[in-house]
Image (cartoon, rainbow, N blue to C red):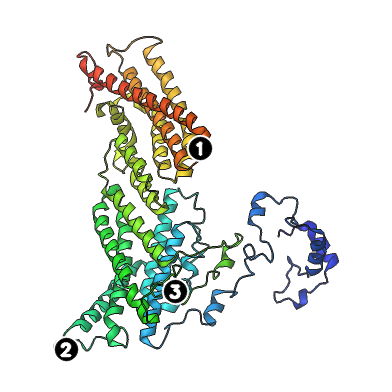
Amino acid sequence: MDWKSTEQASMERHAPNHSSSSSIPATENTVWADASPLLDTVCKELRDGELIHGDNFNLYAAMSALEIMDPKMDSGIINKYASVDEAIEDGLAPVPISIDKTVDVQCIIDIIDHLLACEATWHKGHSLAQTVFSCAYLVRPERTLSHALLDSYCKVIRATCKAVTTIVSDARTHEEEDLFTMSYGLPLNVEGDEKCLSLLNAVEENISRQLRACKAPLSKRKPLEDIEPLQTNFDLEEGYCKALLCRLRFRKHFCHVLSCMRRPQGRGLELARKHIASCISELGSILNSAEFLMFNAYGTCEDGTEDRTTASGRQAIGFDANLNSRISAPTPPRSIKILSWKKAIKYFENLLHHLDIICSYPLDPSLDALLRFVAQFQKAQPDLVARVHLQLLLVQDGKLYGRYPVLAVIIRAARLTEVIMRHDILKNEYFVQLGQIVINMLKILCTNAAWQRRKLGKILQDWRAIYSQLELAFRKESGEGSSISNGENASAGILKHILIWVEEQTYWIAHRFLVLGFELELYSPSEYCMVYWYLSVVLIRLAEKKHLKMTVSDGSGRHTSTSRLFCFQG
């Protein structure tokens, strides 16, 4: 509720002063009053759906308001703990988890699995506070310092979340997943997290030595007796070592993937593909470990439920979905269902596959080839993280792939030579605007289908506006009704090529806009005939402009008197 000054007088009339007994003392600026009588009064008069509010209460405030006693809209009603510290005091996140080392290892694997499910759920657009950071071990980093395995994994999880959040924020294409980048003051920048990979490597090496020790023949085990076993049951040592190693290695390689793909000008794509292949291999090993973990948890290998968020099927220790609900105010906590462990594995497999497609693209400077690639890539319906990486690869520092100036790409697409880049006409403002429109178009094509269609409908107006500016400039350079076939006016010749190309791109965008309507199921069967007619008109016009572009370019190359500026570069 939004209590304004208009209600304060009524509260004072109906409620006695209990400020002296309040746990929070009154100050010069605050006066505590019992609102119960007022609530009793208004409850008798208010109907369902009505709300007490002040004169300046707007729609945004109404959408963000807390509805008292509503389990979904009251941030305090479903909280088991008043704070993270209270949850820890109650034993939510013990360190070590158990004095029995076998149980301790089992629980850590469950925590790792549940964190993977939470991370996949977060990538799907849910709040970071209610997914990954529902783990108390992540919120209180100092508690895990004494446990090397748990501490190193928590550090790398925080570093991964920070990297993904930064990537999405930089791309600015997350409007459809509005809670994705909100951290609400969560500890994403903990001192020491920058060394997470070196710590993880040290833990991985120790477990690898333990695995080699338990697999060694009896005659060679004595020299390895100084190696402390992972847990107390020798028969289970190999299985638990393998289960942990594949999880740690997946996390390590995934961090390297994110790092390599952020290197400028696509320099890390080849190395990223190697780490992607390693990630996919480790995901297969993680899936294969489920049988061993489930058997040791329940004595059976049968999967009893599809909703389990761990490989073993046990409940992970240290998690509470409402742990951070108070710091997420004024937005009420959403109702979130964490993805199952198997669905989380499937999500990361798809994500890695989409990232591999991006890394395998040859960074062709041809705009036509690039548009075909992006449209084909979007047919696979990639999620936000993959689309963001594609956008950041395509547009870097205002250049295509960070390598090619946008105007040079446009000149190439219009089938003109790069010599034209030295022409003074390209310094005009409308060419600068045209370059920015192309950049905006590439960014829009990397958004999800709904957002993309909405933005493409608006950017069509920008393309028509720039066409009008170029047309006026062309008439000014060539004169009304005059012909430039003799090649005497270089500026008019450049504008003619660019005008044809702009029309071609406008029809391509219109075609993309109409096709997205089918993908989004926006058309009713009664509208199909009309939409198909629009498509046929657009495709005919698109084919005409492509043919005209080739004809004009080839024609300018056949005239010996034509300036070298018009030479077609195949």
For the point 29% across and 79% down, the residue is 239
Residue 169, horizontal then vertical, whole percent: 44, 52
Q: Is residue 265 above or below residue 273?
A: above
Does the rendering let one see residue 146?
A: no
Q: Is residue 51 above or below residue 462?
A: below
Query: Which label sits on residue 294?
Result: none
Q: Residue furthest right?
A: 13
Residue 565, horizontal then vertical, whole percent: 25, 22
Whether residue 358 sits left or right of residue 212 in the image: it is right
Q: Quadrant of the N terminus?
A: bottom right
For the point 20% across and 82% down, the residue is 215
**Could you classify mark 2 by the number of other residues whose Cα lies within 10 Å: few (under 14), some (14-19), or many (20 or more)?**
few
Q: Is residue 147 above or below residue 412?
A: below
- Which residue lies under the disc numbered 3? 141
- Which residue lies under the disc numbered 2? 218
Mark 3: which amino acid? Pro
